[in-house]
Amino acid sequence: MGPTAPMLLELQRAMRRSLVERDDSEASTYVAADGLSTAGRLAVYRNTFASVLANALRLSYPAVHRLVGADFFEGVARVFIEERPPQSACLDDYGVDFAEFLSRFSPASSLAYLPDVARLEWAINRALHAPDAEPFELARLAELKEADKARVRFVPHPSVHLVRAAYPADAIWRGVLERDDAALASIDLSAGPMRLLVERRPTGVETRRLNEAEWRFTAALCAGRPLASAIEETPDSEAHTLLAEHFAAGRFIEFGMADASATRISESLS
């Protein structure tokens, strides 16, 4: 009798070890040479695997790609892929920790702003692919008892992200993608830190700079802290103006109520 055919899961695991760990010992037993050596055939799969992932990174990080050049990016991608293979089948999800990887990748250390640009690009990528969601009806807030309004906590729109950067990543990102040499030449790298709000609007993904008070208030709301606790992060009049702007922009899609213990914990962390 011939060898028993492998179960699909066994075959998938063997191929993963070949693609990710470069261990062909098991996968080679399932491959027919048919004019090409077993090792050569598995190498074709491995090269395709790496090429597809590198292209996914390039699509998610176009400004980083242009900043370092195609050859350097290809090399960075290959190292990243070996160290951080994908954990899901969705290519849009691949590269979440690319910015962190770049921050400790010594060949790119001369471009100190590169991880910040990558961090911003990932937020833009997430905003671009976020599902659609309708903002909640403001009339529902008016129905709350006055005593309950301080306990309201909001759910941000899936496309809303906050990015803190040491360098003016937004100006670098925009200048690089627009190929605006004059804008790039005028960037002051010491202008940071930057606090950026990223969101998808009807016209596309947009970024906006926030001052410290705006950042603290918005970050508190997006983290689900009770409204009263978030207001403590910024002057009362400015908080109400910013809250109205958030509502007008549809940045929150739902709200709920924090219990008293959650409010106390949130306030202790402020």
Image (tube, grey):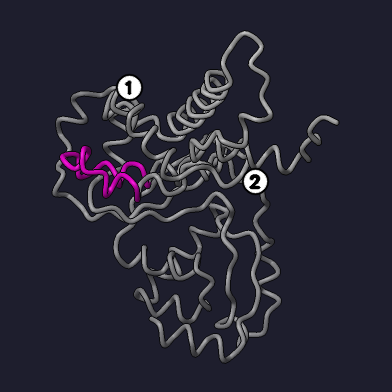
Q: In this rendered view, identify the residue nearer to me: 79 or 217.
A: 79
Q: Is residue 203 magenta?
A: no
- The region drawn magenta spans 100-119
Instruction: Looking at this view, name the residue that lies furthest to the front.
Output: 1
Residue most toward the right?
A: 1
Quadrant location of the N terminus in the rendered image: top right
Residue sitting at x 17%, y 49%: 191
Residue 90 in the image, given as x and y percentages of width and height: 62, 39
The secondary structure type at the circle numbered 1 is helix
Picture quarter with the C terminus: bottom left
Q: Tell me which residue sits at (45%, 75%) in the image.
A: 230
Nearest the viewer among 145 and 177 is 177
User: Tags 2 and 1 in contact by the CB under 8 Å rule?
Assistant: no
Disc number lying in front (2 or 1) = 1
Amino acid beneath label 1: Ala
Provide residue 20's location: percent of width, then percent of height. 51, 38
- The amino acid marked with disc number 2 is Pro
Q: Label 2, on which residue?
A: 131
Rounded to the nearest whole Å, what is the CA distance between mark 2 and mark 1?
31 Å
The vertical placement of 242 against 80, above or below, is below
- Residue 151 image point, x, y percent: 58, 82
Q: Return the x and y of residue 34 as percentages of the image width and height.
A: 66, 11
Q: Which residue is mark 1?
A: 70
User: How many numbered marks are there?
Assistant: 2
Residue count near mark 1 (Cα–Cα under 10 Å), binned few <14, some 14–19, many ≥20: few
